[in-house]
Image (cartoon, rainbow, N blue to C red):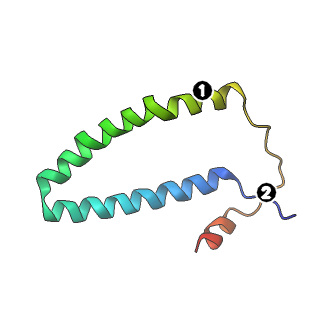
Amino acid sequence: MRPLSSPVYEHRLLGRAEVAIGLFFVIIASTLNPFDAVVGVFIVAPLFTAILYYALFRRVARSAVVDPAPAPTTDRADPATYARRLR
């Protein structure tokens, strides 16, 4: 079995991709209607983030802290492997 790539690299790459996609949509929204884009970014997004955190993520985060996964081994793949696999 081949070694697994680190979840840290996967989440960092996924986070960067999501931020880039989000910025793309904000730019498109701001060209169509700047007021709606500002309301969406500064009011709706934080509101939904807080609702999701208190409704779902807090419970999951607490259970992850109470029963942590075993420590990872040092047998890891090259960080660029995930990016190549994703492409």
* Residue depicted at 51% across the width and 29% down the height: 58
* Label 1 sits on residue: 62
Q: Is residue 1 left or right of residue 24?
A: right
Say above or below: 37 vs 21: above
* Residue depicted at 18% across the width and 45% down the height: 39
- Quadrant of the frame with the N terminus: bottom right
* Label 2 sits on residue: 76
Q: Is residue 57 left or right of residue 77?
A: left
Say above or below: 13 vs 86: above
Residue 68: horizontal and vertical position, in percent?
72, 32
- Name the outermost residue toward the right: 1
CA neighbours of label 2 inside 10 A, class few (<14), some (14 to 19), many (20+)? few
CA neighbours of label 1 inside 10 A, class few (<14), some (14 to 19), many (20+)? few
Residue contact at pointers 2 and 1, CB within 8 angstroms: no
Q: Nearer the viewer, residue 23 or 46?
A: 46
* Residue depicted at 37% across the width and 33% down the height: 51
Task: Find the distance from the CA under tag 2 to the CA under tag 1.
Answer: 27 Å
User: Callout 1: helix, strand or loop?
Assistant: helix
Residue 37: horizontal and vertical position, in percent?
19, 53
Under mark 2, the amino acid is Arg
Q: Which mark is residue 75?
A: none
Q: Quadrant of residue 31?
A: bottom left
